[in-house]
Image (cartoon, grey):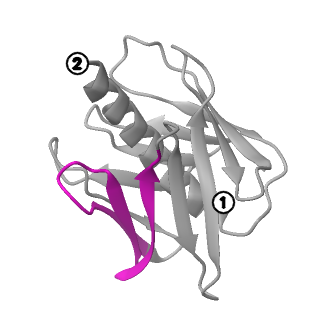
Amino acid sequence: MATLKLSSSSSKGDFKVLDGAKELCEVVYKNWFSSTAITNLNKSVIEIKPKNIWTSKVDLFKNDRNVGDITFNLKGQMVIRYINPDRTEVNYILKNVSGLKLKFEVYNAEKQLQFRLICISKWHQLSYNYEVEPEAFDKQTDLEELLVYCGYAANLYISIISAAAL
């Protein structure tokens, strides 16, 4: 794993997936009040759309084909379910393991740590930037694509937790 980062590119939630200084893609939300996001990655169009108005389930599309979803479980974790091109299902769990300072860990279905997203922003900023801290990534799916889903899931997690606090 190189020096991968997720870098906020607007206050509405847009972010870039970076490999060092090279931009791999930019995830852009449709508008301020929409949870629909789109990006182009490796010649594929990835679209992430809420299944309902509560955004409790979000569908993942790749080139207009449903390839999985993101859900919020009762343990306060984001579950990313992805269906590979060979039709095998892969599940990842994204969970915040720190209190006020955001630090997410991503685990596979076998509960093996894949990587961490370490927030490098200040709590009072409207944007969140993450450094990707590598572990033993199992390569069951494309890492850059998984980072798109994890970045979206991290934003969704912050939205859900913030709404619950009000």
> Which residues make up the magenta segment?
45-73
Query: Among all residues in the image, which is located at the extreme front?
Result: 74
Residue at coordinates 56% horizontally, 32% vertically from top-left? 130
Q: Quadrant of residue 86?
A: bottom right
Residue 119 place in picture, x, y as percent: 56, 25
Amino acid type, callout 2: Leu
Using residue 129 as the reference point, say whether residue 5 is left or right of it.
right
Q: Quadrant of residue 163?
A: top left
Q: Which residue is mark 2?
A: 166
Residue at coordinates 61% horizontally, 20% vertically from top-left? 98
Using residue 15 as the reference point, say whether residue 118 is left or right of it.
right
Residue 97 place in picture, x, y as percent: 63, 27
Query: Among all residues in the image, which is located at the extreme right?
Result: 136
Q: Which residue is mark 1?
A: 143
Q: Is residue 51 magenta?
A: yes
Residue at coordinates 32% horizontally, 51% vertically from top-left? 56
Q: Quadrant of residue 24?
A: bottom right
Can I make out residue 69 in this image?
Answer: yes
Helix, strand or loop at label 1? It is helix
Q: Earlier in the sequence, mark 1 or mark 2?
A: 1
Helix, strand or loop at label 2? It is loop
Residue at coordinates 85% horizontally, 50% vertically from top-left? 136
Can I make out residue 2 in this image?
Answer: no
Judge depth for marks 1 and 2 and give the one in front. 2
Q: Identify the main secondary structure in magenta.
A: strand
Question: Between residues 139 and 127, which one lies in front from this camera angle?
Answer: 139
Q: Is residue 58 above or below residue 131?
A: below
